Each structure stands twice: as C-alpha cells, then as structure tokens.
Amino acid sequence: MGVCALQVEVAPAEAQQQIKATLVNIPSRGSIMADVYSVTTTPNPKSSCLWIPSENLEKLRCGVKVLQVLLSFVAFVLEETVHSCISCSALYFFEFVSCSAFLFTLLLLVLLYTALRVRVGVSCWPQLDFVYTAVIALLFLMSSIIFASSNSDTSIEKTAVAFGFLASSAFLVDLVLFVKTHGFPFQSGQKPTPTSGVSAATDAPPETAKLNEAE
C-alpha cells in the first residue's frame, strides 16, 4: 500500500513538469506577431525610387546621356556669353537647340532611370527615346554647322561650336548603342518565338510520315 501511495503522489508531480515543459516550448503571441511582421515587411527592390539599371536604359547609355546633358549645358552657357553676332539667326538657332537638348535630355534621363515613368502612363519608351535622340542629334548637328559658318571667329564662339559638335556626336553614339542593344524600335514582321506546344505540333507530321514508311 505504501508503494501504491508513493506512485499516486509522484504521478501528479511528473504531469505538472510535463505541462510546464509544454508551455515553455509553445511560442508566445508576441513572437508569432514579430515573425509575421518581419516576413510581410521584407523590403522590395522594385519599390525604390531609382531603378539601376532599368529595362529601358542600361548603365552605358545612362553615362552617354549624362554626357549629353553636360555637353549641351556647356554649349548653351558658352553661347549665352556671346555679345555680338554677324548672323544672329544662326546664334539663336544654336541657342534654342542647345537649351532644348539640355532640358529635355535631363527630363528624359530622370524619367527613364526612375520610377516616375510608371506614373506618366507612356508605354512606348523605346520608340520615344529613339525618335527624340535622332531628332536632337540632327538638329544639334545642323545648328553647329550653321553657327560655325556664321560667326565672328571669336574664341568663345569657336568653343561653343566645338561643344555643339561634341554633343551631336554623343547623341549619335547613343543611337548606335540603342540599335545594338534593342534593335530598331519600329521594326515589324518579326516572327514570334515558337512555344513548346507549337514546335511539337510542327514536328508531328515528319514523325507520322516516318512511321508510315516503316509500315
């Protein structure tokens, strides 16, 4: 009877220890909420303001566009320091092109390299980039040639013309890099890449013919 009584008294103690061990192993509500919060608040790289590189502008072309902005700005500033002109129409044309190239290229660079382009609602960024770069390259080259042939041969005017030609070259280089990377944006008639189902369907007739020949 003494042994039975000892077993009856020890059993509840062991049960209490097991219950305490089970309660210790159960995670608290605060730890569960912390784990859930840490999972749901994982930073998303796509939510950042800058997308480097972006799908429409690679790092190399971004550097070229930064160079375009700098060269256009220097050409515009040098042109603004000219106080007298033989043919003012050539000077004003060069001023208009250099200022427009500086402002719009800077705006295009910001739109292509940040998440702001998503809010604009434009879907044809490659076509827009190609057309703009080609038009500015042509206008900058024309204005530089006209201003070079109609100036007072001062050092400031010659320097402005030199930066105009450098800016034109930067826009032309950007066009070449664009075509090498993305191809001509208005090219049509390209055959779509066949899927596995289509390729299997096209391969089926030759296999059927071979089976018929074997029979």
Image (cartoon, rainbow, N blue to C red):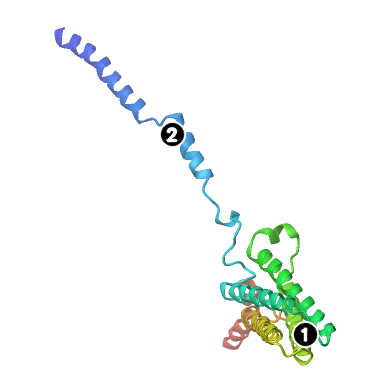
x 72%, y 78%: residue: 133
Q: Is residue 177 visible?
A: yes
Element class at badge 1: helix
User: 183 or 105, which lies in front?
Assistant: 105
Q: Name the residue beneath numbered marker 2.
A: 31
Q: Quadrant of residue 210?
A: bottom right
Q: In which quadrant will I find the C terminus?
A: bottom right
Element class at badge 2: helix
Image x and y of residue 19, in percent: 33, 22
The alpha-carbon separation of the residues under discs 1 and 2 comes to: 68 Å
The label on residue 186 is none
Q: Earlier in the sequence, mark 1 or mark 2?
A: 2
Label 2 environment density (alpha carbons within 10 Å; few <14, some 14–19, many ≥20): few
Farthest residue toward the left?
2
User: 12 or 81, which lies in front?
Assistant: 81
Q: Is residue 187 visible?
A: no
x 53%, y 44%: residue: 41
Q: Name the residue beneath numbered marker 1.
A: 143
Farthest residue toward the front?
83
